[in-house]
Image (tube, grey):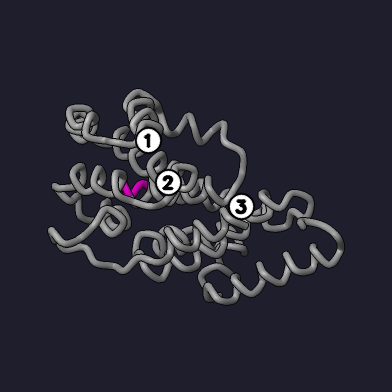
């Protein structure tokens, strides 16, 4: 359930503010970078990494998804970050970023197991680049909503539906992609018709039922 809380806090707490603004921190910039490539992204990212109280286990999926895709999409950004890497004070995150300088995020996704964190990584990749392939990765998790064996697999499907629903109301590009696919996929049509609270209640209800059966405790 910690993964679910993390996705809730990081993915859907943002406001759609896209103007260049020196007061915006990395958390804000990273939600709309695909719309407005903030020129101060490296400085704000390093400041965030060095000062955030969020522990590395929770920070890693966000950094991996965002910069893994951003570096793949923008060689200049990667080059500039390489020049600034010694300013990163947290050894584990610094090591992760060095790895991402040469990694291919798409290959990472191909071998990753379904989880809410994987959805969060793909959202971060989408917000970094605007590429719909990362939305498609999230959409591909929807069938896992029907899984009643593995709670992490279920939550991969549940948070896919819930986050797509919420972000389709905040991001025009998300709504456009889902609208394009809705006639071929009933689940996507439902995502566009329901509201996030519907899925929130449904997820909580299913988890409660499973726990009453002695599962997912």
Query: Residue 4: which disc?
Result: none
- Are circles 1 and 3 on residues that touch, CB within 8 Å? no
Q: Measure the C-alpha gap from mark 1 to mark 3.
A: 25 Å
Mark 3 or mark 2, earlier in chain: 2
Residue tagged 2: 59
The spot of residue 174 in percent (x, y) is 40, 60
Question: In the image, what residue occupies the spot 49% across and 63% down?
Answer: 8
**Height in image: 45 above or below 202?**
above
Residue tagged 1: 93
Residue 134 is left or right of residue 49, and the answer is right
Question: What is the secondary structure assignment of the residue under circle 2?
Answer: helix
| Highlighted magenta segment, given as a residue range | 128-132
The spot of residue 98 in percent (x, y) is 33, 26
Q: Quadrant of the C terminus?
A: bottom right
Q: Is residue 129 magenta?
A: yes
Residue tagged 3: 156
**Height in image: 70 above or below 203?**
above
Q: Main secondary structure of the magenta part?
A: helix
The spot of residue 118 in percent (x, y) is 53, 45
Q: Measure the C-alpha gap from mark 3 to mark 2.
A: 18 Å
Image quadrant where residue 106 sits: top left
Q: Quadrant of the N terminus?
A: bottom right
Depth check: give the residue in front, 63 or 57.
Answer: 57
Residue 112 is left or right of residue 83, and the answer is right
Callout 3: 10 Å neighbours few (<14), some, many (20+)?
Answer: many
């Amino acid at each position: 359930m910690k993964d679910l809380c993390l996705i809730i806090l990081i993915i859907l707490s943002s406001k759609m503010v896209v103007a260049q603004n020196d007061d915006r921190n990395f958390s804000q910039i990273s939600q709309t970078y695909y719309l407005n490539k903030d020129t101060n992204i490296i400085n704000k990212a390093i400041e965030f990494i060095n000062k955030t109280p969020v522990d590395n286990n929770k920070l890693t999926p966000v950094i991996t998804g965002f910069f893994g895709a951003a570096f793949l999409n923008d060689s200049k950004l990667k080059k500039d970050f390489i020049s600034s890497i010694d300013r990163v004070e947290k050894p584990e995150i610094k090591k992760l970023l060095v790895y991402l300088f040469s990694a291919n995020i798409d290959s990472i996704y191909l071998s990753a197991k379904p989880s809410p964190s994987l959805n969060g990584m793909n959202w971060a990749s989408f917000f970094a680049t605007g590429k719909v392939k990362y939305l498609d990765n999230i959409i591909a998790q929807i069938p896992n909503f029907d899984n009643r064996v593995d709670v992490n697999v279920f939550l991969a499907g549940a948070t896919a539906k819930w986050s797509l629903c919420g972000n389709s109301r905040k991001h025009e590009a998300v709504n456009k992609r889902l609208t394009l696919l809705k006639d071929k996929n009933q689940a996507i049509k439902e995502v566009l018709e329901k509201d996030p609270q519907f899925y929130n209640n449904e997820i909580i209800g299913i988890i409660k039922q499973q726990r009453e059966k002695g599962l997912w405790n």
